[in-house]
Amino acid sequence: MPDEKQLKARIKKVNIKKIKNVLETLDGARIKTWLNICAKCGLCAESCFFYLANDKNPEFSPAYKIKSTVGEMYKKKGDVSLPFLEASMEALWARCTMCKRCSQFCPFGIDIAAMITIGRSVCQSHGFVPEFLAKAVENYRVSGNQMALTKDDFIETCEWMEEETADEIKGLTIPMDVPEVKFMYTLNAREPMYYPQDIAQIAQILTVAEESWTMPSEGWECTNLPMFAGDRTLAGIIVENMYQKARDLKVDKILVTECGHAYRSTKYEGPYLSGYPDGIPPIEIIHSVELFCEYLESGRIKIDPSKKLKEPVTYQDPCNVSRNGGLWDIGRIVMGYLADDFREMSPNKDYNHCCGGGGGYIPMGPEYRVKRMVSGKIKAEQIRKTGAKLVIVPCHNCFDQINDLNEEYDLGIKSVSIKEVLCEIMMIPDKFKPDEE
Amino acid sequence: MYDKILFCSDLFVSTDQAFLNALQMANDSDAQLLVFHVLESGHRYSGHVETYDAEVVSDAEVFDKIAGNLKKYYSKLISSNFKDKIEIKATGGVPIPVPSTPDIRYEVRGGNAVIEILRFARKEDIDLIVMGSYTLGVDDESDEEPKVEQNGDPKVEPSLGSNAKQILLSAKCPVLIVTPPGQRLNIELDD
């Protein structure tokens, strides 16, 4: 149930002009075309894990989800009721992760996720956003990051991780706000808040690779839940904070942590959200998977052959890294270096299924957990069929979802990030080995 | 010997003995005692705290209120154990000398208990961490019914929990694990 603050944020009366404005300004002509050309062929249905996991209920098919929400909004030219907007939340948030798999099967290439985005923006314009997601978005508004961490909190966490890791890698530092370096590292606010060891791990890898990099004291947040909450204005501000910091520091590139939607936001949607009409980010964006691949291919990071993973391993393609980010083959190259017994899921690569936690789904919180577990059944079965004991997951959302699925479906697996594996099995050159006491 | 001692409170009476021991050591060393509680967040996407009744709290006002409640609870515990300034036994435990006016600070945070305890200990330059360690008759790995006392209360048994283990292994300062009072020697050798 929404709390008092959220109820107050809801507009008491439908503002038709406001809805029309959202519908028209967000690619109105293209959306109208898509709505008109949809032949109701049903090919999208079989591609959608929500549909497959929910007994092929037609209400879970992408075409129906759009027709019953955004389609109605357009048909009625914005003249919809508040109960309609409230009811639309279910289809827009709880039955779609905007993974874009359906678009690969649509004979007309209709971008369902783009229309879901518009539906979410319409709902958000009237204060209808799932409660937990709305609270996370509020954190961005007040602090610029998902966890409402202060600048001091963040810097202290980096200093802490530097101290923790200095014993393992000689000369390791987490350089803060160093200008004119190659990479500015950006991360998910969950890392300083809940997984500070992730910061230590990336520092180890970048140190061993002798990389030129810096951690920014501000503009480090690369996640963008406002983007999934329909708050495009705030989403643009968050991305621009990062771009601006990169410009201030005069870095060559922005390096994105192992997070899927952060890559989508920073590289693909962010430029539009923050006012770059050509859709090209002002600074080159690199995902961690790409950099790790480059290190392994070039030999800047070497794997200790005796430590290479022996147990069966599979790889989760985060939708926003593989299908929507184009990095599925890069992920396989990395797996070749890490694992002796790599096993593909089926389907895989750009046709892999979403984990079921993306598009803002996990941040929607415990209220939606049961539904998330039901829809995650497809991913759970994919993993089980591989026989893998280790799932390598370069995305925070996928990581949590797969851990939840492991518990729910008793998969007997462990999920890990690439950087965690790298830190375990990479060779440490002598010059970085700590002095013996 | 110590300047700052950190007592990690989990709000269960089972750790009262650990608190009293921490207080005793703070008193002996003329150290400040910091009583710290972490509201565990099961929802790691907003920094908000998911409590057992699904309420979501995260603001300073709520943390201050809980810190105030902790102060009330432990002040009462101190007075009940040290009334009339006579050396008495803590509930079923070891004798504790009368403390002078204790210097105690109460702090509450939200997040992951292990991470927040380690983060706080580093920030405050803590010399010693004191924790209780027990289980309320519930074994997460088991499907068996939780053990209960005759009066229906959860049965408190000594157990080194995962948080205590991680703190013990990760903290930069010494860690003292205080088991609950009234334990019995129980030697059960595995086959």
Image: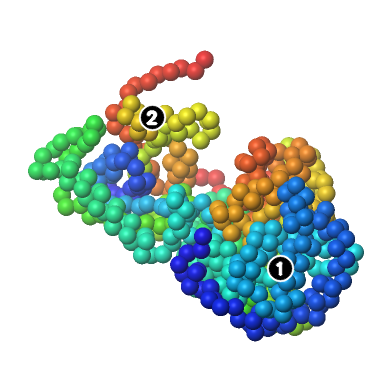
User: How is the rendered protein coloured?
Assistant: rainbow
Vertical relation: A240 (above or below) B191: below
**Residue A316 image position (x, y, % from top left):** 74, 50
In the rendered image, is residue A220 in sight?
A: no
Mark 2 Cα shell of 10 Å, populated few (<14), some (14-19), many (≥20): some
Quick check: do tags 1 and 2 share a chain? Answer: no
Kindly identify the residue that appears in the image at 74 percent across and 63 percent down.
Answer: A65
| Chain under callout 2 | B
- Tell me if A213 is positioned left or right of A336 in this view: left
Vertical relation: A160 (above or below) A11: above
Closer to the camera in the image, A425 or B12: B12
Closer to the camera in the image, A194 or A31: A31
**Residue A282 image position (x, y, % from top left):** 71, 79
Observer-side mark, 1 or 2, equals 1
Kindly identify the residue that appears in the image at 69 percent across and 82 percent down.
Answer: A20
> Which kind of residue does numbered mark 2 sit on?
Val
Q: Secondary structure at mark 1?
A: helix
Vertical relation: A79 (above or below) B179: below
Closer to the camera in the image, A83 or A343: A83
**Residue A98 image position (x, y, % from top left):** 72, 63
The residue identified by callout 2 is B148
For residue A43, which quarter of the picture? bottom right
The residue identified by callout 1 is A69
Kindly identify the residue that appears in the image at 39 percent across and 37 percent down.
Answer: B133
Cα separation, mark 1 vs mark 2, equals 52 Å
Q: Secondary structure at mark 2?
A: loop
